[in-house]
């Protein structure tokens, strides 16, 4: 692997996120009036091809659910994460993210269950594209779900980005993605039978434990001279 390969990979991932966001934002804008837009209308509004839309979303239903969830959650989450009172506290920022997502859970979780089902039911390795479309040589597979959760977790943990090593920071984000989101809620509700308050306490405790463990690990590495 060349020294600039991680940067190229990061650039490709950033481009995929921007393209996906443009598609979702276009779907949300077109849906705001109450009508259901077509794939062609969404593609035109996002300035991408119909084929590109299908490269990210296997169906119109999948796309519209994703757009609805974004319109529901994004404004309050962005407000919570820009609170100056917690600007330098990653644990408090993750707490704020969790509280905000769970506050809107009555509206978002039913849609989240549908979105998970649509994603899980898609056969592994099957590209989300119309039947007539041919695979693009050398193209990396698009994420099967919008990276909104990852972006919010990265934003919440931003104070640690320059403190932790890149590997430790990315591992923290991956670990937090396991405990912050619909999948964790479904386990706590369907398997553990927790009520909403106990659910929030469990998720917040687990997330805070991960953040504090990453900080402790970094401090120990600095103390012993390990990188």
Image: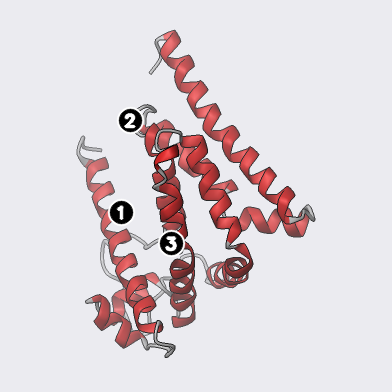
Residue depicted at 43% across the width and 58% down the height: 148
In the rendered structure, which disc, 3 or 2, sits on the residue that comes first in sequence?
3
Residue 112 in picture, x, y percent from top left? 57, 67
**Mark 2 crowdedness (10 Å alpha carbons): few <14, some 14-19, many ≥20:** few
Q: Is residue 134 visible?
A: no
Q: Quadrant of residue 53?
A: bottom left
The extreme front residue here reads 85
CA–CA distance in space, label 2 to label 1: 20 Å
Q: How is the rendered protein coloured?
A: secondary structure
Q: Given this view, does label 2 or label 1 mark the residue nearer the observer?
A: 2
SS for dot 1: helix
Tell us which disc is closer to us: 3 or 1: 3
> Compared to 169, does 43 lie above or below?
below
Name which residue lies at 56% across and 34% down.
Answer: 210
Tag 2 secondary structure = loop
User: Can residue 163 be seen by looking at this rendering?
Assistant: yes
- The vertical placement of 38 against 81, above or below, is below
Check disc 2 and report the residue beneath it: 162
Q: Quadrant of residue 5?
A: top left
- Horizontal and vertical percent for residue 7? 23, 43
Of residues 171 and 77, the one nearer the viewer is 77
Residue 82 position within the rendered picture, expressed as x and y whole percent measured from the top left: 39, 47
- The first of marks 3 and 1 along the sequence is 1
Q: Quadrant of the C terminus?
A: top left
Task: Identify the mark at residue 13; answer none if there is no mark.
Answer: 1
145 or 76, which lies in front?
Answer: 76
Residue position for label 3: 74
x 44%, y 88%: residue: 34
Left/right of residue 25 with respect to residue 168 in the rendered view: left
Which x, y percent locates residue 151?
40, 51
């Amino acid at each position: 692997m060349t020294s600039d390969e991680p940067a190229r990979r990061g650039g490709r991932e950033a481009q995929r996120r921007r393209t996906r966001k443009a598609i979702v934002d276009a779907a949300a804008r077109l849906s705001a009036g109450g009508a259901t837009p077509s794939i062609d209308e969404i593609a035109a509004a996002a300035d991408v091809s119909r084929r590109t839309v299908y490269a990210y979303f296997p169906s119109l239903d999948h796309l519209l659910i994703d757009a609805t969830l974004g319109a529901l959650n994004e404004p309050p989450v962005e407000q919570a994460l820009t609170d100056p009172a917690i600007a330098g506290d990653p644990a408090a920022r993750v707490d704020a993210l969790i509280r905000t997502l769970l506050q809107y859970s009555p509206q978002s979780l039913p849609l989240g269950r549908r979105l998970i089902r649509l994603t899980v039911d898609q056969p592994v390795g099957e590209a989300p594209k119309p039947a007539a479309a041919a695979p693009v040589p050398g193209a990396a597979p698009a994420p099967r779900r919008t990276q909104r959760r990852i972006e919010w977790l990265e934003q919440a943990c931003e104070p640690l980005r320059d403190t932790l090593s890149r590997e430790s920071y990315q591992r923290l984000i991956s670990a937090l993605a396991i405990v912050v989101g619909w999948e964790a809620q479904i386990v706590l509700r369907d398997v553990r039978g927790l009520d909403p308050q106990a659910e929030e306490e469990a998720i917040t405790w687990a997330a805070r434990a991960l953040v504090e463990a990453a900080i402790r690990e970094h401090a120990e590495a600095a103390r012993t001279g390990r990188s």
